[in-house]
Image (cartoon, coloured by chain):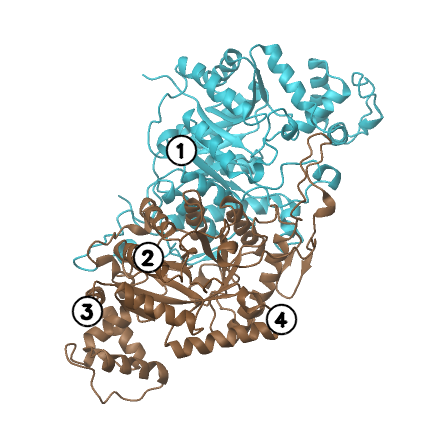
Chain colours: A brown, B cyan
Amino acid sequence: MTRRQLKLGAFMRPISIHTGAWRYPGAVPDANFNFPFIKRMIQKLEAGKFDAFFMADHLAVLNMPVEALKRSHTVTSFEPFTLLSALAAVTDNIGLVATGSTTFDAPYHVARRFASLDHISGGRAGWNIVTTSNPDAALNFGLDDHMEHAERYKRAREFYDVVTGLWDSFADDAFVRDVESGIFMDPEKMHVLDHDGAYLKVRGPLNIARPVQGWPVIVQAGASEDGKQLAAETAEAVFTGGGPIADAQKLYADIKGRMAKIGRNPDHLKILPGAFVVVGDSVEEAKEKRALLDSKVHYANAIASLSINLGTDASQFNPDAPLPDDIPDTNASKSGRERVIALARRENLTVRQLAQRLGGYAGSAFVGTPQTIADQMQEWLETEASDGFNIMFPYLPEGLDDFVERVVPELQRRGIFRTAYEGRTLRENLGLPRPENRFFRG
Amino acid sequence: MTRRQLKLGAFMRPISIHTGAWRYPGAVPDANFNFPFIKRMIQKLEAGKFDAFFMADHLAVLNMPVEALKRSHTVTSFEPFTLLSALAAVTDNIGLVATGSTTFDAPYHVARRFASLDHISGGRAGWNIVTTSNPDAALNFGLDDHMEHAERYKRAREFYDVVTGLWDSFADDAFVRDVESGIFMDPEKMHVLDHDGAYLKVRGPLNIARPVQGWPVIVQAGASEDGKQLAAETAEAVFTGGGPIADAQKLYADIKGRMAKIGRNPDHLKILPGAFVVVGDSVEEAKEKRALLDSKVHYANAIASLSINLGTDASQFNPDAPLPDDIPDTNASKSGRERVIALARRENLTVRQLAQRLGGYAGSAFVGTPQTIADQMQEWLETEASDGFNIMFPYLPEGLDDFVERVVPELQRRGIFRTAYEGRTLRENLGLPRPENRFFRG
């Protein structure tokens, strides 16, 4: 029996998810609009046998105060479909996952673009279904009021049904192209969806052949009860937040349990926590790199993040002293507050360092040598905390090169990561079945 | 002074605009979803120094009876943005023109995708503004009633204002990326559009830097009074229907006259009639090729086209005899009817041949040798009937290869077509100025 293996996605922003990364030594500050640079990054990830390249997305600029905005590299960049399509033309195997909003787009457009990306890439597309909770985005689409959470999820579920229904507009063998008789398409193998639901009305058929993968891979990231249920019912990969391994194991069991309950094979959904990975020659050096990176976050932004997390004005504290013991209780999230205080104590951080950690990237991180990182990843895999990871690189290109050149070989040596792609499509590499056409069963 | 030169666009469908082309000898019937084939076509056009590659688009399948649909290769293919972005990654100079509907899409999405394509391609994007008159498309977007013509044009004009306003969200030098000070973007150089008009409400700013070209090139194709006026006010290239040279000269003078009236430089809009070009060693051979191509149109579809054009059931006529003289008057368009009758008499066509011409492609055509075709094109250019052409290839790959290998060198020999690209962007090659940013004047 072959050993259970990690699935690896790259959770990308052109500069990095870390807000200070554009100032890190060796960074490429103009990467947001530098296609050749992003092309080099994805080709490196493909050389490292990554399953997928995911480009995070936003639909607004004004989602932060102008003082933070002017220091931010994260709000302006390529639109994901145009970018991933261009990258499809310069890669052969890596999956291409884009975000498609169920709140601010039409299902006909979404179905069509993902199907098209799947055809262009030879079966490598994935759809990250997001309900877009950003009220600043709503204003860019003529909406003053943002839809309520539960309603957004109901609409998302209907949207998913419509999009997948449109993908099934044609049987896989509908296009006969018989030059002799002049029959190009068999109309018996075309289905008119005629959807008329609570939120959406769409006739169909989609003006595109069924995707190479049947359907592009369905990805989700919602962590709410609604989000977990939608994932269990529909998703094939889930991006989770990471967090302590015990929490991850609980979430893993929760989602896979929901799947079993509704009769889905739990192997047909891959749980991929985000993992911010900093590689050094020693654990100490990796920590120093992370500290240097965090120090690049501007103090004004950093202290604003800390103040929000603590629910109190942190600018009153001495930046170069430890966090005071007597932080007043507030009505900010208690668990979030306690997590921040525990972090400061555990890593012995000054107020400045703590603030800069929170202002940079404060999620789950693996900071160490290729060996210690592989140890942790292996533990997560073997204790059912995850099926792999969605890797965030702290800075580019160095952080990505480090991972591909140093961590990947260590994972391969242990037999927990592929040395060659298993198949040609994202589905085949992730070990997911090709969906049947609901209107034309084989 | 250099001689006035032709601008050449390629008006593409993966198989051809001609409905019988997929059955022509040497055709590639699966081209609709064959990215490597389309890549070869665009690279050949780039070798031929074409200005632009335009992929025609539809938003519906059910725009014809099922009897025609099952023989049609024209309704299912790649979505243009995903396709053109992928093609951007494998080309260096040729322009990439996509259709963006002002009726069925949101201006924030449209602005963003064109800006992104412009950045990815290094300044080669063009936006073909269409108001989408297809009522079948409306049903795919939850709309039962289609917007009236005049209202569609008012909305289109507002849509254009919003999209170009969003492109101007940032000054060209807004992104300072000063690593030392930590200032990434100068907020004084960011404009919040806050548009609130009759049809659209959009806050902005766009989450993308100003396009390389300032704005992607604005393209239009409307031939109505509203369409011509919108073109004169906003367009930089216009795709026209062709027709007799005298009509083209009239239209040319009309549009350029409207421009002068509102103070626009008439050179800043290129009029490009569609031209279906069939190349042979002799005029006779070219005509035979066209006849062979037309013969590939199924007779049932062909006779339906002829019946519509004549306003009478043409299936009663003897297919292999000339068109009868006594065709009854009807309330079908009289000028269209007379044009069809004149065509049959002029080319001495049987009912079958006439029907197949109309069912295949009945627009303006240049059918001859490289010399006769170049003669005609030169005449159009020199008599102000056009600034160039939007070439339609009768069948692929042969028709495209013929044009690039045989007609282009003849045009170059005469000094009326470039031998090297003038610039790096589509604007530079078309000789169009870079628009000023309306909010940040240089």
Q: Is residue A26 above or below residue B7?
A: below
Which residue of the protein is positioned furthest toward the right in this rendering?
Answer: B316
Tell me, for residue B264, which label it has, or none. Answer: 1
Which type of secondary structure does the marked residue at label 4 adopt? loop
Q: Position of residue B185 (x, y in %)?
A: 26, 56
Find disc 3 in the rendering and name its residue. A284
Q: Position of residue A350 (x, y in %)?
A: 18, 77
Label 1 to label 4: alpha-carbon separation: 66 Å
Both marks 1 and 4 on one chain: no
Find disc 2 in the rendering and name its residue. A409
Which residue of the protein is positioned furthest toward the front in this rendering?
Answer: A1
Q: Amino acid at mark 2?
A: Pro
Of the pair B324 and B231, the residue shown nearer to us: B324
Q: Is residue A66 visible?
A: no
| Side of B186 where A247 appears, left or right | right
**Residue under mark 4: which chain is it in?**
A
Which type of secondary structure does the marked residue at label 2 adopt? helix
Which type of secondary structure does the marked residue at label 3 adopt? helix
